Each structure stands twice: as structure tokens, then as C-alpha cells.
Amino acid sequence: MQCQFLPSLVVVLIALAAGGGLAAQDAETAPAQPPQADPPAGEDAKPRVIVRVDRTTEVKGHIELEEEDVIVVRTPDGEVRSFAKGLVLRIVRLVEPEPGQTGVVVLESGQMHEGVILEDDFDHVLVEIEGIEARFRREVVDYVVLNPTFREQYEAYKAALKPEMAQRRLALCRWLVDERRYDLAEQELTSLLDDHELPEARRLLRIVRAQLALREKPPKRDEAEEEPDRPEVEADSEPNLISEEDVNIIRVFEIDFANPPRVVIRKETIERLINRYGTNKLIPASQEERERLYRADPIALVRLMFELRARDLYGEIEVLTEPHALDLFRRRVHDTFLMNNCATSRCHGGPDGGRLILHRRNSRDARVRYTNLLILERLELDPQWPLINYQKPLDSLLIQYGLPPEEARMPHPPAPGWKPVFRRASDRMVRYTQQWMRSMFRPRPDYPVEYEPPTIEGADADETGPEGQEAPERADR
């Protein structure tokens, strides 16, 4: 069940997109600035536009500067062009969809196609319609508008509610059930029943908990990621991996309260929390209020534990599903280009990969994946260029080493058989990698995991730069 106001929001967005940037028919551009061959770092993070100068001319690029009357665009070739907004036909703003985000592709003919927006690029638009990918050439596309994400819809619905609105809160719960967001539905129903005794809400809560019970607790390896009918080698046969407990604690530190995973906190943990931190003002004083902690939403308890800095209990938080940022790392980085390009046996997955050694065997196992994450975070190849630069993602060696030498500010060192992973800095996989880095918790936590990246005796320490940089400033949760 969808909220009544949500479709109208999409209509407004489409109307705004269609009306933006309309101007005089006789278009002229302001004098172009001299070309600049080397675009600055972070170029692909800037908004992308297509300026339709007149009926036959359009300019594609990233926005360098935009004011009320003027827009300055840098083209993929490095040329900088400035335009008076009142003298162009149209400014089409390309969208940056979240994974799985739906939207509408509006064609020049007026036809509309709704589906999951995969790419909105200078040359084409890629959309998944009923499970089938469709590619539209840019010249036939007018513009793309994104539908609100589930999180945006949910937050908008929540913002319009007050505690006394029992029936509207119940409608929110029904919508969450329709969307199969059973974790949030359980949370909202529990909160609703604390304020109002509604038989329908109690019945719905039983259904939701039955659905949650059908979800098996994930085993020690991600069954959903296994390849069927293919023998697997136990992860224990791969040396120098972190433990299952380490995997869980990393997930704890990456919990995003705006998009939380499913967690479990046992009764015994709540008892220890009260006994050890009962004198803190954040723990309720009365017995009645303390009893409510045993019925509280697990995510609310995690937030309380973080506020108390109860690090001795973090390991008892069971994170059953992957936090959003770590899920992005799995889908967009690790299981795509990192394993398929960087961690091959002839590259950093074998003995000829220099000082960077990535684990490849049983790569779909969470222990292997999180071990590789720690390697990327903790291994220093160059004091000025970390493998992962969370402050400036494009300056990460993980990205720079994957670019063609002419595109990179820090090219990959010469190596037999090396080929670039990305076509250019604005490549879709580069954008996905930056999106993952920006989604990780800030400021970066110092995981309480003892792990040293593996090294090969005799590897050239000067191969990719000097050592000795002090560790970046980090902050714990």
C-alpha cells in the first residue's frame, strides 16, 4: 500500500525536470574559455549536465560553476565552456541513482518508461524494466527523473505523523508489510502498541514476527552468495583470515541507523548492560522503565550502547544482515572488479603481485571479503596515496591504479600483463566505488580487530612509493 502523497511527489519532480532550463529559441553561447587538458581530481563527483544550446548543438560535461544566470561546464575532453542560461534551449541534469532506485525515462517522443535506473550517462541510459535491461541512446532520451527511494518515502511518511495518529501509523505499518520491510514494520508496530491498543496492529505484529521467523539465521558463511553445485574449499584452509567474531564486530561498527541491518540482542546482554552501566543517566532508574528495555527495538538498544560507549558489549550485538555500506562493498567493489581484475593469480592474488596480496580462494565467504577490506584499509604502499582515501575517494590508489595511465594522477606501476580496470575517471564502476567509500561510517572507526596485512618476503618495498606516513586520525564509535 503506497502513501497517497507519494505519486504526486514523482509528478512534481517530473514537472520540475521538464521545465528546468527552458529559454529563448535563438541560443548563443558566451565566449568559451581556453581548453584545459587536465581536469581536477574529483571531477566525476561533480553534477553532470547536457546543455542543449540550440536544436543542433549540445555540450556534455561536469558543472564547474553555476550561478543564477550562468553555468560553466567542463567537457570530457577538458574544454571549459560557459553559457548564459537565458540563451540556451535546455539544461538536462543527469541523475545519480542509488542501487535499485526506480525512476522514469522520458523520451523525446514523449513516451515514458519506468523501471530501475542503472545508468544515466552522456551516451546512453540503461534501465531495467520488469527484469530486462533496456538501453536507450542518449539522442532519443529527453531526461530521466528518479522516484523517491524507499528511505525517502519512509522518512516523509514518518515526518507527517504524530503519536496520536493511531490509524495513520497503522497505515504506515501496512505499507511496510506490503513492501516486505518486516524489520521496520515490527519496530513501528511495537511502538504503536506501546501507545495504543489496537487489535489490528497486534494481529499484524503476529504476521510480521512469523515472517521474520521464516528467515533462517545466516550460517557462518553467506548461503545466499554460494554458487550451487560447486564444491567449496573451507575458509579455514586459507591462512591469515579474520574470524567470524571479527566479521560481526566490523558489521557492528558500520551500522547505519538511517538504514539499519537486522540485529539481535539477547536478554543476557541487556542484563549485563543494566548491571554494568546502571548508574549512568542514560539507563532508566525505575524498574518499570528498565523492564521496557527488554522489549525495546534492538536498533534502539544498539544506539544506547553506542551512546554509553559500552564497547565491552559490542561483540554481543549479533548483526544478521550486512550493513548498507558493507553490502555496497560486496556488490559494487569486491565481487566485481576487485576479484575479477585485481586479485587474479597473475596479479595481486598470486606471488607476483608485489606487496599488495589479496585473498582469492572462497572469495564469497564473508571472512575472506572482510579480510580483504582490512588489507585495503591498513596496507600502506605510498604515504601520500592510501589504497582507500575516504576523504578524497578519487585519490585512492584502489581507483588510480585501475585507470588508464593517461587518465590517472598516480598511474599503476609497470607490470607484465597489466590492463586498466576502468575506461576513464567517470566510469560507472569508479562512481560506484566512490559511492561505497562515502557510505562508510565517518569519522572512520578503529576496528578492534587484530590483523596485519600479509606480505611476501623479498617484495620490493620501494615498488610503489616510500613508507613511514603516520596513521590518519581516526575516531571510535
Image (cartoon, grey):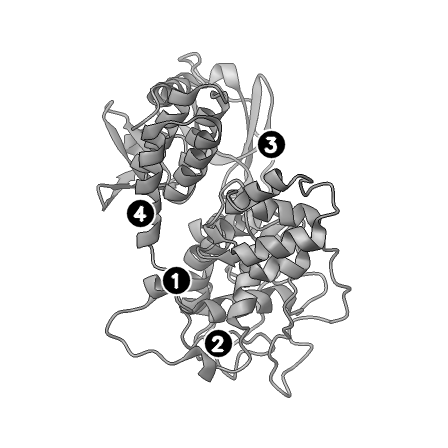
Quick check: 329 above or below 449?
above
Q: Amino acid at mark 4?
A: Gln
Q: Can you name the residue that lies furthest to the top here? A: 24
Disc tally is 4
Q: Earlier in the sequence, mark 2 or mark 1?
A: 1
Q: Earlier in the sequence, mark 4 or mark 3?
A: 3
**How far separated are the C-alphas under marks 2 and 1?**
32 Å
The residue shown at (48%, 70%) is: 367
The residue shown at (63%, 59%) is: 313
**How far separated are the C-alphas under marks 2 and 4?**
45 Å
Q: Amino acid at mark 3?
A: Gln
Q: Position of residue 164 (x, y in %)?
A: 48, 19
Front disc: 4 or 1:
4
Determine whether the residue tagged by mark 3 lies in a helix, strand or loop: loop
The circle on residue 211 is 4
**How far separated are the C-alphas under marks 4 and 1?**
15 Å
What is the crowding at mark 1: few (fewer than 14 residues within 10 Å), some, or many (at least 20)? few
Q: Is residue 313 left or right of residue 223?
A: right
Q: Earlier in the sequence, mark 2 or mark 3?
A: 3
The circle on residue 33 is 3
Indicate the quadrant where residue 207 lies.
Answer: top left
Front disc: 2 or 1:
1
